[in-house]
Amino acid sequence: MSLEERLVTALKARGKKVTPQRRFIFQALEKESHRHPTAEEILKIVRKTLPDVSLTTVYNTLHNLVEMELLRQVDLGEGMTRFDTNTDIHHHLLCKRCGRLEDIHRQFRGVALPKEDARGFVVTSHQVIFEGVCPDCQTTTPTLKH
Amino acid sequence: MSLEERLVTALKARGKKVTPQRRFIFQALEKESHRHPTAEEILKIVRKTLPDVSLTTVYNTLHNLVEMELLRQVDLGEGMTRFDTNTDIHHHLLCKRCGRLEDIHRQFRGVALPKEDARGFVVTSHQVIFEGVCPDCQTTTPTLKH
DNA sequence: TCTTAATTTGAAGCGATTATAAATTAGAAA
DNA sequence: TTTCTAATTTATAATCGCTTCAAATTAAGA
């Protein structure tokens, strides 16, 4: 089942409407997912096709998609939220100079919280964030973006 | 050397002034560090002693301390930055219901990025974030705070 | 004490996101 | 098909965490 079909299925299953806005937002997400776009970036792309979409609709749709588990939210303390259609478990590699973000599709053995460290928490997931400097930023003067 | 002394030393070493604001902000951080307070929380505490401190000063001081490596910034995508006087390498355990945050003082062997996954990045650090539900929130109805 | 650069302060500003309320529309029912 | 209505979209305003700015204050060396 294609992602687009999964969208329609998920929407109908919840009695939600299949609107052009939702279709195009989802398409943009799919196409740009590897770059982990922000809401603003998605808005810009969708407006090429639907010039009047509002930012509010983009946010609403993004939240819907997260709720329906077709989209994953990626928060790395950059000041904005990024989105990723890849909802499989994976980790991240962040360039602390330019913000470039890469997926790491690899399981790390040994990353489990021993009971004596868990303080009674029920641990449901974990995420590893690697930080460093990407190839581009290694060759340029450190002009920090954040 | 106590933390307070380390503060004074670090300030003097850089020709910075030892102001009451800086002292009290640092004291508040020390006392509250285990809870990983936010700037607003620190403001509230310091105002009990210095009713006229400004939020700007709190932010300034917080940034100074991070720069001087007496404080660590913790960004977990909650929408605000938290602070931690424990600057040793450690990981985190976050309650996704109430935001309670615990330090994990444990090294996870096997968390290293193989060259073929690094895409040419120079990796300088990594952080593991465990997510789950804390003991308190396990017994109460899921009323999400964020 | 005097001097001055560092610091503090309140106010204004900013970027990301959310709330609100009126207008529009998808899609079920007639 | 047309009608109806709840869901959706939109523009606008508001909020939140944080930063910038310029004027007033102050730590600390001479």
Image: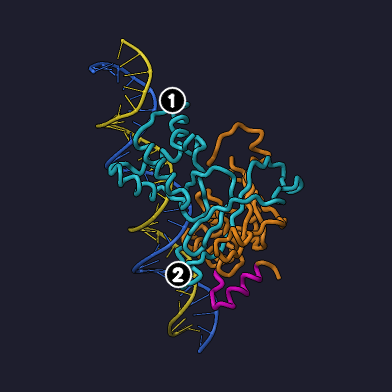
Chain colours: A cyan, B orange, C yellow, D blue
Q: Tell if the residue under mark 1 belongs to the same chain as the one under mark 2.
A: yes
Residue B44 visible from this viewpoint: no
**Mark 1 sits on what residue?**
A15
**In this view, D8 is above or below A104:** above
The residue closer to the viewer here, A99 or B64, is: A99
Within 10 Å of disc 2 (Cα), the crowding (few <14, some 14-19, many 20+) is few
- Residue A23 image position (x, y, % from top left): 38, 37
- The secondary structure type at the circle numbered 1 is loop
Asked if C22 appears above or below A31 in the picture, the reply is above
Please, what is the three-letter code of the amino acid marked with disc 2? Thr
Residue B88 placement (x, y as % from top left): 67, 62
Looking at the image, residue B133 sits to the left or right of residue B79; the answer is right
Numbered range of the magenta stretch = B4-20
Q: Kindly identify which chain the residue marked by label 1 belongs to.
A: A
Give the residue at mark 2.
A143
Single out the mark in the foreground, 1 or 2. Answer: 1
Q: Would residue D3 be found to the left or right of residue A10 on screen?
A: left
Q: Toward the viewer: A102 or B140?
A: A102
Residue D2 locus on image (x, y percent):
23, 17
Tally of numbered discs: 2
Which residue appears at 45% of the width and 39% of the height? A63
* Magenta segment includes B18: yes
